[in-house]
Amino acid sequence: MTDSATLLWEIRQDLGSVEQAIREHPYVKAVEDGNVRRERFRFFCGEQFAIIGSDLRSVALLVHRSRTQRSREFFLKVLQGESAAWEALRPLARAFGMGEAELLSYEPMPMTQTYPAYLAWLASYATAAEVAAAFLVNFPAWGANCGRLSRALREGYGLKPPEVAFLDLFATAPPGFEEEAMAVLEQGMARGAEPRTIKRAARLLQGFERLFWDGLWEVSQR
């Protein structure tokens, strides 16, 4: 029987090319080079407003569906992070001329919303182990790009630290995140979660993460 550490290693090996594509995405490089016009950052803010709004509900459902104290505590911490991000998004949006009315009226793009749509599916139907593994694979790549964007927006676009707090929240995983997620994965596998479906959840969520950046890159070039 495959143990949780071996399974996670296999998943990361299988998805190495996808992670590389995310971490080396041309959208992030274009921002670092100052080649994205300021008005185009409204797309990032508007898409994230829709994504975080959906993810808050999805993670709350994961807390509700948790069958063990360990998974409940893990998802509750993730939910607290999403709640903090929901508040921190406002200063970033205002830096690019988007107040509450503009965020509420923004119409999201299909390509960039595949991630929250799939997370909503996972929250409704998947095991805690599947979601924990998907987060373990996805969060580092997303966080690395957020860190790069934060630096680029401060150094190249003149944003202040409070305005990039949304990005900084994700740039570094909270203390104990990986250990707690691994514990949920291990517990889930011990309770019968299937490695095949765990791998599928990680593969799809990471693929939809890539589509998010692809969508931003496409619209930023218009």
Image: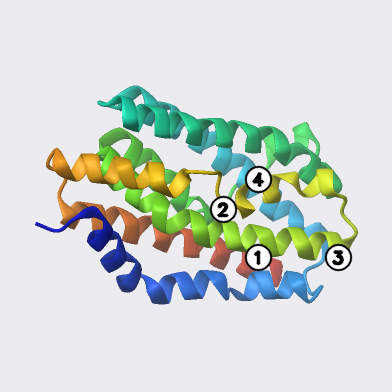
Kindly identify the amino acid type of the residue bearing the numbered disc 4. Leu
Earlier in the chain: of badge 1 and badge 4, it is 4
Q: Position of residue 188 (x, y in %)?
A: 21, 40
Q: What is the number of the mark on residue 17? A: none
* Quarter of the image that includes the C terminus: bottom right
Q: Is residue 190 left or right of residue 166?
A: left
Mark-to-mark CA distance, 2 and 4:
24 Å
For the residues marked 1 and 3, what is the alpha-carbon distance in whole angstroms?
23 Å
Badge nearest the viewer, 1 or 4: 4
Q: Position of residue 133 (x, y in %)?
A: 33, 51
Q: Which residue is mark 1?
A: 219
Percent across and percent down for residue 30 are 72, 74
Q: Disc 1, disc 2: CB below 8 Å?
A: yes
Q: Secondary structure at mark 3?
A: helix
Disc 4 packing (10 Å; few <14; some 14–19; many ≥20): some
Task: Identify the amino acid type marked 3.
Answer: Glu
Q: Quadrant of residue 153?
A: bottom right
Q: Residues within 10 Å of mark 2 (few under 14, many from 20)?
A: some
Q: Sequence order check: which comes first, mark 2 or mark 4?
A: 2
| Mark 2 or 4: the one toward you | 4
Q: Which mark is residue 109?
A: 2
- Which sits in the foreground, 211 or 147? 147
Q: Which mark sits nearer the N-terminus, 3 or 4?
A: 3
Which of the two discs, 1 and 3, sits closer to the camera? Answer: 3
Residue at 30% across / 53% down in the picture?
A: 201
